[in-house]
Amino acid sequence: MPLRSTDWDSLNQTRRRNLKSRLAHRRRKSVKKLFVGTFPHSATESELRTLFEPHDKVDEVSLVTDRDTGRSRGSAVVEMADAAEAEKAIAALNGKELAGRDDH
């Protein structure tokens, strides 16, 4: 059965969508997620954001919390847009203290 013009259009639209999806995935791949640990349980997402933002734009900060109490466990994941800048932030902040507790 031969393909009609509308079938070709549909096929081309699907190919364009797939290409856009792959390109978006490549852009997201450069995002760097950093595990940050051993900071005070009282630290907030905004404090961590303030600590990392001088090094590059911070996309997201997610505190790791205890599922039963909701209390911070003293660790977080910081997501930065640029992997190279994230590596610089690691070098600059590794071993620094945040409110009296070493960051390892």
Image (cartoon, helix red, strand yellow):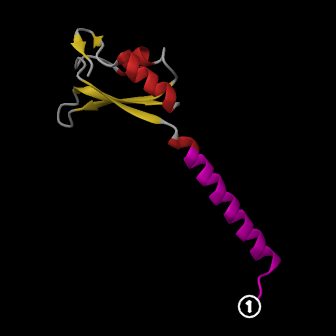
Q: Quadrant of residue 41?
A: top left
Q: Quadrant of residue 49?
A: top left
Secondary structure, mark 1, is loop
In the displayed structure, would residue 1 be above or below residue 31? below
Task: Name which residue lies at 28% across and 32% down.
Answer: 64
The N terminus, quarter of image? bottom right
Side (left or right) of 10 relative to 44: right
Side (left or right) of 80 relative to 41: right
Residue 66 position, x and y percent, is 20, 33
In the displayed structure, would residue 93 be above or below residue 71? above
- The magenta stretch is 1-26
Task: Name which residue lies at 82% across and 76% down.
Answer: 5
Task: Name which residue lies at 51% across and 43% down.
Answer: 29
Tag count in the figure? 1
Q: Is residue 65 visible?
A: yes
Q: Residue furthest right?
A: 5
Q: Residue furthest left?
A: 68
**Which amino acid, mark 1?**
Met
Residue 35 position, x and y percent, is 33, 31
Residue 7 position, x and y percent, is 75, 76
Q: Which residue is mark 1?
A: 1
44 vs 93, nearest the viewer: 93
Determine crowd level at label 1: few under 14, some 14-19, many 20+ residues with C-alpha closer than 10 A.
few
Task: Name which residue lies at 28% across and 16% down.
Answer: 95
Q: Is residue 46 visible?
A: no
Q: Quadrant of residue 99?
A: top left
2 vs 36, nearest the viewer: 36
Residue 30 position, x and y percent, is 52, 38
Tell whether position 20 is magenta. Answer: yes
Side (left or right) of 67 relative to 57: left
